[in-house]
Image: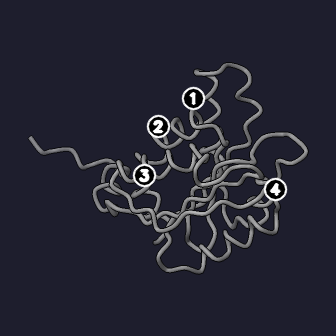
Amino acid sequence: MAEAPPSSAAEHKAHAPRTVRCFVLTISDSKTPETDASGRLVQELLRAGGHEVAGYRIVRDEPAEVQAVIQACCQDPGVQALIMTGGTGITARDSTFEAVEALLEKRLPGFGELFRVLSYQEIGPAAMLSRAQAGVRARRLLFSLPGSPAACRLALEKLIVPELGHLVREVSR
């Protein structure tokens, strides 16, 4: 009996890079490297998943500052993905969504949709306040996550780390 051909997703994953070079960006008006629990957690989870942290920075929740870091990362051949945490809520100071959205060449709406579904299972209707998003710029993956460690853990463990190599393979083609 002939073996069934592998599924497209399984085939893609089989040819995906095992290690992705990621830049971690925390967007916060108050965090420091010592108090940035989410930024540290993102780095730890990326490394635990076999990925490399190519850089880390904290910037204020100012659109021009956020966009400058994104643009620099997208020109850096040592960065394949940018994981951002913070600034995705709905307060007057939360401007990360708009700053990132303006730079995306392609959007991955499924990421935000799945994140909110999974978040709803953990925190209930407050999940609707999240404006987590993902997309592509200059063949780099951009993920914008809420600032809470629990939200970062959820996004990294359930969505980003399991698919990161596959996503990089697809965006690089």
Give the crowd class for mark 2: few <14, some 14-19, many >=20 residues within 10 Å.
some
Work out how far the residue at label 2 is from the one at label 1, CA to CA, in angstroms.
Answer: 9 Å
Work out how far the residue at label 1 is from the one at label 3, CA to CA, in angstroms.
Answer: 19 Å
N-term mark: 1 or 3: 3
For residue 125, above or below residue 61 = above
Residue shown at 49%/42% (left/top)? 159
Residue for badge 3: 46
Residue shown at 51%/49% (left/top)? 40
Residue for badge 4: 98
Residue shown at 68%/74% (left/top)? 71
What is the secondary structure assignment of the residue under circle 2?
Answer: helix
Q: Residues at badges 2 and 1 in contact (C-beta under 8 Å)?
A: yes
Give the crowd class for mark 4: few <14, some 14-19, many >=20 residues within 10 Å.
some
N-term mark: 2 or 1: 1
Q: Amino acid at mark 2?
A: Lys
Q: Amino acid at mark 4?
A: Glu
Give the crowd class for mark 1: few <14, some 14-19, many >=20 residues within 10 Å.
some
Q: Is residue 43 left or right of residue 102?
A: left
Work out how far the residue at label 4 is from the one at label 3, CA to CA, in angstroms.
Answer: 25 Å
Residue for badge 2: 158
Residue for badge 1: 118
For residue 89, above or below residue 60 = above
Q: Amino acid at mark 1?
A: Leu
User: Quarter-wise, where is residue 123 in the image?
Assistant: top right
